[in-house]
Image: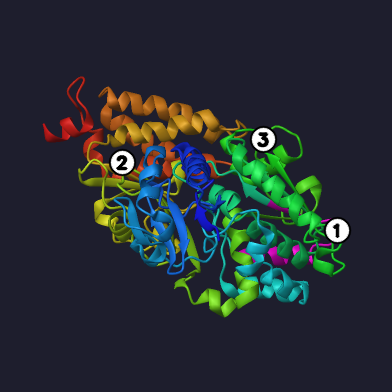
Amino acid sequence: MSVTVYVPGDSSALAVGAGRVARAIAAQAESRGLPVELVRNGSRGAYWLEPLVEVATPAGRIAYGPVREADVSSLFDAGFLDGGDHALALGATDDIPWFANQERLCFRRVGLIDPLDLDAYAAHGGWAGLDAALGMTGADIVKAVTDSGLRGRGGAAFPTGIKWNTVLGAQADRKYIVCNADEGDSGTFSDRMIFEGDPYLLVEGMAIAGIAVGATMGYVYLRSEYPHAFRLFREAIERATAAGILGADVRGSGRTFDLEVRLGAGAYICGEETSLLESLEGKRGQVRFKPPLPALKGLFGKPTVINNVISFASVPDILARGAAWYRDYGVGRSRGTLPIQLGGNLKRGGLVEKAFGVTLRELLYDWGGGSASGRPIRAVQVGGPLGAYLPESQFDTPLDYEAFAALSAMLGHGGIVAFDDSVDMLEQARFAMAFCAIESCGKCTPCRIGSTRGVEVVDRIRASLDREKNLALLRSLSDTMLNGSLCALGGLTPYPVLSALNHFPEDFAPRVAGASASEAARA
């Protein structure tokens, strides 16, 4: 009888040699005459352990990692197919604290199954939400999503049920579902992990949305830097269509829902929903004026639901298990769970799914293990390149939309990037302005011109030219961008700039020529 061995096919695992490890396992098994079934699963999200190899044993799955190609022979010698002891043995996968202490809802299948195996998806609870939705009215589906407290996981945190209800009530001959998978924020990769580890979850969530609001067509706008995810998802759509899950007769219900995936054009601004719609229509990615809202006049001028990957991925559980079940996770008005991506200067980077309420300090130290450099963590940026920098004094802030808003910060897509005490926060403020100048679509003056002037002002501060005057000018410019920009790119760029100014003023102090900010602070 063959032994099942799991080696991730996730692109991050592939980048550190998972493909070579898989081939080496297959070759060793063949040469030793040992029957092995090799499953290419998604990553569990503990990237410091990749490639993470798991073996199915009567006692459960046993993990080994990080495994290199050169380790494979010794693993066989140690009897790892039976869960044998080895220097890389980590014990039962489910007992590893990184996994045991999470609340995995969206990611509960990621790493467990072959992502493209329809039978495995169904065996682990797949399609239960869609089947429930097919027996409900659109209004009842929308009510369940509304009652769950689910808010958009793409950054704006707008209540998902309200958006769906607007599209449900709109009168039109055609409606659309659009998934914003243009995951461009620094330190974020949860969307990619869904595509590469559990693509049918997104198929199911989008189909439920279509059934709810009366849309028969859905589009996924995927960032161009994800070719592996693109190939996997396109195949997932083909298999789901062949199985009757998508198409003219969704699971024998007589309902229609088709799905296509499109590659984006590589522009950060296309992560903004109206710019995304322009790009999806084949136009230059520029922000639209609002109103009208996309929910009333979106793709091709028709009512459109636009949510991000994690928003759609949260919906099947809500329909299968009930709004009250989902609402039991979280705190305040932040309900459910958030896939948190840990990056930057941390010992243990990866994805952690936790209910809202966990603190930054817990994430940085209990999961992240502190800084990789061994130096004190000085600042963390939460929410991508437009997110605020939070100092150590705010590390006890719980992950909660309102708690972060009170600090003039945002959770965004759940990306956390850590910096140790060698970071120069003036340079980080400059980077924010430079990033905005490069990525601006150019449609509005505060963003297009303000960001360019912002880089110039920071350069004058760095050169100690009229320092006090330019510090005041930088704050005034940030206020103009915050309140006058057409979209969140220009409107949120002041968050990292002002947080750096407010929390790390010493980095904006005069410095000796050639000295770093940390050296200047010590002088």
* Mark 1 and mark 2: Cα distance apart in space: 49 Å
Query: Which mark is nearer the camera, 2 or 3?
Result: 3
Q: Earlier in the sequence, mark 2 or mark 3?
A: 3
Check disc 3: other Cα within 10 Å, few if <14, some if 14-19, many if 20+: many
Q: Residues within 10 Å of mark 1 (few under 14, many from 20)?
A: some
Residue 405 lies in magenta, yes or no?
A: no
Q: Is residue 319 left or right of residue 138?
A: left
Q: Is residue 454 left or right of residue 26?
A: left
Give the Cα distance between marks 3 and 1: 25 Å
**Mark linked to residue 172:** 1
Rendering coords of residue 519 (x, y %): 16, 31
Q: Position of residue 249 (x, y in %)?
A: 86, 63
In the figure, residue 106 lies in which quadrant?
bottom right
Residue 451 drawn above or below residue 237: above
Classify 310 as above or below 268: below
> Which secondary structure lies at badge 2?
helix
Q: To which residue does mark 2 refer?
A: 501
Query: For mark 3, what is the residue?
Result: 285
